[in-house]
C-alpha cells in the first residue's frame, strides 16, 4: 500500500500540530511508501521513512496553488489512496485528482465546529476518520471513530502530586474565549479565600491565534490582577511540542475549562501522564465512570470548580493513585497511538477494497 498524506505542518516541535509527526512515522511503518504534502516543514532532517513536499518556499498564493496542483498531478497516480489531516480544504483540493485517477480519499477531522468547507469535504471523501462522536458533528455512514492517537510513551510518567500547600494546576490550550480561562482564574481566587489554598499555582500553556484572542488574553491577565493572584498565575505561552510533556510532569492536577464539546487532546495527554483531571466538557462524561461527579464541574461556575479541586486535594494518596491508574487506562484502551494506528490502517484497507 502506498499513501499520500496532506497535513498543515511537518514539524515535531510545532505547538499545535507537532503530535502529527509521530503519526507520520508510525503510518510510514505500516505502508510500503508514504509521501507527504505540507504547507510548512521545520525542524526535520531528511527522513528515510517518508518523503516530504513543502509549499512554504513557493512564493505567493498563486505559486503555491500551482505547485500543489503539479504535485497532486504527479503523486496521486503513484499512490493507492490520499489521506488528509485536519484542514478541510485539503480534501477539496485533492478531490479532482483522486477522482481523475480513481484513488480513495480519507479525511481526518477533529473539531467541534462544522464549516461549509468541512461539509463539502465530507461530501467528497470516501471516509471521514475522527476521534469521537463529538469531534465530527455530521451524522453519516462515512464517519469512523478511531480515537485521538495519543503517544503514550511520550507522556507516560511516574508523576507524584505535590502536597496541598504547594499545588500546581496546569491548563493547556489555545487562549480563546471558548476555553473559558476566566472561570479558572476566578476559581483560583476562591480556592485562596474560601479553602485556604493560598499557595496554589496556576500554569497556563498556550497562546492566542488571532487579534481578538490577544485581547482576550489581556482581559484574563487583568482579571488575575483584579483578584490579587497575578503572582500565582503563569502564562507560559506556546511551547514546542517536544517540551510540553515536561509541564505535565511538573503538575499535580490538570483543569480544562474548555467548552468546545469535543474530546480535548490536552486532557487525554494529562490523563496519559498520570495526572487527575477536572473538566466541564460533557464529551468526557461517558468515560469517567464512578469518578464522573468528582472530576467534572458545571460550566461557568468557578465555585463548583474550586469545590472539586479542593476535594481532590483532600484524597488520600492511595485513592489518587487508583484514579490515575483508571484515567491512564482510558487513554491506553481507547485513544493511544497503538490503538489508533491499526484502526486507521483498517479504514485504508476498507476503502481500497471498495474502490
Image (cartoon, helix red, strand yellow):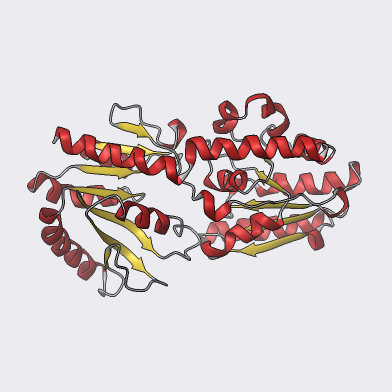
In which quadrant is the C terminus drawn? top left
Q: In which quarter of the image is residue 232?
A: bottom right
Residue at image position (27%, 68%) is: 55
Residue 279 visible in the displayed image: no
Q: In which quarter of the image is residue 330?
A: top right
293 up-or-down from 122: above or below:
above
Residue at image position (71%, 54%) is: 251
The x, y position of residue 323, in whole percent, is 70, 35
Horizontal placement of 135 versus 128: left or right? right
In front of the other: 209 or 34: 34
The x, y position of residue 264, in whole percent, is 53, 43
114 up-or-down from 288: above or below:
below
Residue at image position (46%, 33%) is: 134
Horizontal placement of 172 versus 306: left or right? left
The x, y position of residue 246, in whole percent, is 63, 61
Looking at the rendered structure, the number of numbered marks drawn on it comes to 0
Residue 289 visible in the displayed image: yes
The x, y position of residue 79, in whole percent, is 15, 53
Amino acid at each position: 500500500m502506498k499513501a499520500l498524506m496532506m497535513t498543515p505542518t511537518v514539524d515535531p516541535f510545532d505547538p499545535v500540530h507537532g503530535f502529527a509527526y509521530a503519526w507520520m512515522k508510525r503510518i510510514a511503518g505500516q505502508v510500503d511508501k508514504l509521501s507527504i504534502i505540507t504547507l510548512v516543514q521545520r525542524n526535520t532532517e531528511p527522513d528515510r521513512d517518508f518523503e516530504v513536499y513543502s509549499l512554504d518556499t513557493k512564493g505567493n498564493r498563486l505559486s503555491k496553488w500551482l505547485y500543489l496542483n503539479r504535485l497532486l498531478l504527479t503523486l496521486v497516480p503513484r499512490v493507492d489512496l490520499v489521506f488528509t489531516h485536519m484542514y478541510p480544504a485539503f480534501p477539496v483540493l485533492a478531490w479532482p485528482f483522486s477522482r481523475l485517477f480513481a484513488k480513495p480519499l480519507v479525511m481526518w477531522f477533529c473539531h467541534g465546529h462544522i464549516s461549509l468547507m468541512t461539509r463539502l469535504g465530507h461530501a467528497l471523501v470516501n471516509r471521514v476518520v475522527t476521534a469521537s462522536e463529538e469531534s465530527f458533528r455530521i451524522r453519516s455512514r462515512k464517519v469512523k471513530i478511531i480515537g485521538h492517537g495519543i503517544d503514550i510513551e511520550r507522556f507516560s510518567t511516574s508523576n507524584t502530586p505535590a502536597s496541598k500547600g504547594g499545588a500546581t494546576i496546569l491548563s493547556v490550550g489555545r487562549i480563546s474565549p471558548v476555553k473559558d480561562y476566566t472561570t479558572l482564574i476566578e476559581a483560583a481566587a476562591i480556592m485562596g479565600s474560601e479553602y485556604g489554598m493560598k499557595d496554589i499555582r496556576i500554569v497556563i500553556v498556550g497562546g492566542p491565534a488571532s487579534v481578538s484572542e490577544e485581547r482576550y488574553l489581556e482581559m484574563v491577565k487583568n482579571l488575575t490582577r483584579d483578584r490579587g493572584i497575578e503572582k500565582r498565575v503563569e502564562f507560559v505561552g506556546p511551547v514546542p511540542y517536544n517540551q510540553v510533556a515536561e509541564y505535565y510532569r511538573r503538575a499535580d492536577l490538570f483543569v480544562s475549562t474548555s467548552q468546545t464539546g469535543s474530546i480535548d487532546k490536552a486532557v487525554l495527554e494529562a490523563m496519559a501522564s498520570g495526572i487527575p483531571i477536572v473538566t466541564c466538557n460533557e464529551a468526557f462524561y461517558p468515560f469517567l465512570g464512578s469518578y464522573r461527579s468528582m472530576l467534572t464541574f458545571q460550566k461557568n461556575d468557578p465555585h463548583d470548580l474550586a469545590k472539586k479541586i479542593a476535594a481532590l486535594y483532600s484524597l488520600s494518596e492511595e485513592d489518587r493513585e487508583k484514579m490515575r491508574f483508571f484515567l491512564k487506562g482510558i487513554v491506553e484502551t481507547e485513544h493511544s497511538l497503538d490503538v489508533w494506528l491499526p484502526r486507521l490502517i483498517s479504514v485504508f484497507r476498507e476503502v481500497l477494497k471498495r474502490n
